[in-house]
Structure formats: structure tokens, C-alpha cells
Amino acid sequence: MTRDLRGYADQYPKVRWPNGARIAVSVVLNVEEGAELALSAGDERNESVHEAVQLVEGAPDLCMESHFEYGSRVGYWRIANVAESHGVPLTLNACARALEATPWIGADAAKRGYEICCHGWRWESHAGMEEAKERALIARAVDTVQRVHGKAPVGWHTKSSASVNTRRLLVEHGGFLYDSDAYNDDAPYYVEGAGRPHLVLPYAFDTNDMRFFDRPAFVRGSDFADYSIAAFDWLWAEGADAPRMLSIGLHTRIIGRAARIGGLATLIRHMQERGLVWFATREDIARHWLAHCPPR
């Protein structure tokens, strides 16, 4: 694979967002509960990263499982209610096995009009995965999302690293408008996938509540809000001249905690008060880009 270190080289397409918005904001809620690696689910090992960082070997990790369960029992509803009270649509980045374990989330997402972007089958990296296995997992994941949510996913995002085959396999499977397996830009772009242009909507690990866990950079809800507001304000200013997109990454078991959720509410209020913002699902952003900046 050839890396593209140049990108747009600051010569972005003249794409404008709906209603003169300066920035498209995608709020992504990761739904992974029930898809984390667990010996009790027949997986080869237990997940080791949650509120604590520990690896329990040779036995089910009931502590880890309980921490993940908070997301589906409490966090999802708290986050969805905050988003709905502010009129903000969500894209659920959902592992298919998680939806199978929590079908009420798929049903609620359909009722609220949320998009479900497929986050793989299990909550696992695809790097180095054998091609036939990955092809089968993509098909299984798509079928599960279709069954639980009532609509097949049009987006894909691998946990951690995709494989060198993932993008081609998505194009070959068909039905996908975009993937988010990139962190390298502030606007959508096209790549060649399986012989034809394929749309990429970059994601972000910095404006993401995972940093409450990552050594950790965020401690209070206000830390998340302050950092994300700084990113939003800068991109909003740049959006006067170039298309800008901001991804806000959330996890049900992380920002859904009572001490952190206020940071999300503060962030949303700030963005709405600034104005000229398009809050959109990733599917809506993809369709807008495809219509107004079609591949050459």
C-alpha cells in the first residue's frame, strides 16, 4: 500500500455544508458492550482495558464485564437523552456482536433515527487478519446489523487498525458508502478501493472520551469539553474558507458516567450557541459529499 502524505495540500474542494454551516459535526457513540473479548463469551482472552487496566488470565474477568455492562444498562440511555434534548443526531459505531447482545439498543436507535455504522463483529483490531476470515466477519456483521436495526450499515469503522484488505473487502461486499478507518484529515476524501473511488470520513482519537482511560489525559467532564471546544472553535474559524468536519467520539461506558456526562452537555451547548453548525450523521455527511464533490 502506498501512503498519501500530501492529501489536499491545503487546496480543499469548494464544498459548502447545508444552510451555510461552517462545520459538519459528527457525534459518534461507540456501542461495544457484549463484543469485548471475554473468556465467558468463548473468546481467547479477556479484555484488559476498562476503568482499570488489568488482565485476568485463565478465568472470566467479572470486574471487567461489570464495567462494560454499565454502558448498556445506564450510559447509553443517559447519552441518548442528552443528545435528544439538544436535537443532536447520533451515529452509533456499533459492534455487531454487541447489538446481538443488546437488541433493545438497535431498536431504540431505529426509533430515534440514529445511523448505525458497523464497528466490526467483535471489538478487535483487524490488522493481520486472514482475508477469508475477515470477509466472512464483514458479511456476518452486516447481516446482524440489518436484522437488529432494520437497516444495513452504509459505514464501517474498525477498532484500532484495519487490515491491508479491509477497504477492498468493504467495496467488494457492496452497500458501503464510506469507512472511517483513517485519522489523517479534517475533511472527507476519496481513495481507490477495489478499482473504484471510495469515500473516507476521517475519525479522531483526540476529541474522544477514550482519553479518560488513555493514561489519562481527561479527568473531569470539563477536560473533555474544554479540549473539544478548542478543536471546534479552530475548525469553525477555518470553515469560512474550506470544508471542515469534526468527529466527537463517545463511549457508553465512559462519557455515560454521571461525573462526565456534563462535559458532553457543555460541549453541545457551546457549539449550538456559536451557530453555523451542521450536526449530522456520518451517512448524511457522506451523501452530501458524494453529491457535491463526486469522485473524478
Image (cartoon, rainbow, N blue to C red):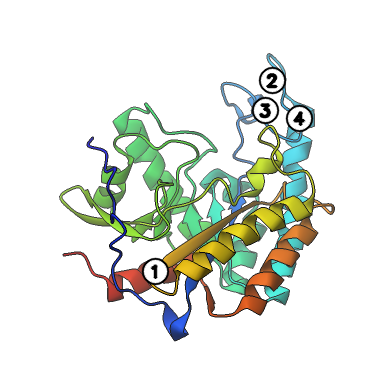
Residue wearing tag 2? 55
Query: In the rendering, which numbered label is found on residue 154?
Result: none
Instruction: From the image, state whether disc 1 or disc 4 is nearer to you.
Output: 1
Q: Residue at x 40, y 53 (%)?
A: 185
In this picture, residue 41 sits left or right of residue 79? left
Q: Hey, what amino acid is under mark 1?
A: Pro
Labels 3, 2: front one: 2
Residue 67 location (% of width, % of height): 77, 38
Q: Are marks 4 and 3 in contact (CB under 8 Å)?
A: no
Disc 4 to disc 2, C-alpha distance: 9 Å
State the CA–CA distance, disc 3 to disc 2.
Answer: 14 Å
Q: Amino acid at mark 2?
A: Leu
Classify 10 Å Cα crowding around label 2: few (below 14), some (14-19), many (20 and above).
few
- Indicate the secondary structure of the residue bearing disc 3: helix
Is 282 displayed left or right of 53 in the figure? Answer: left
Which residue position holds label 1?
Answer: 243
- In this rendering, which labeled residue sits more in front, label 4 or label 2? 4
Picture coordinates of residue 125 (x, y %)?
Answer: 47, 33
Q: Name the residue carrying label 3.
A: 40
Q: Nearer the viewer, residue 161 or 34?
A: 161
Q: Position of residue 82 (x, y in %)?
A: 74, 68
Q: Residue at x 28, y 54 (%)?
A: 9
Labels in figure, total: 4
Q: Which label sits on residue 52?
A: 4
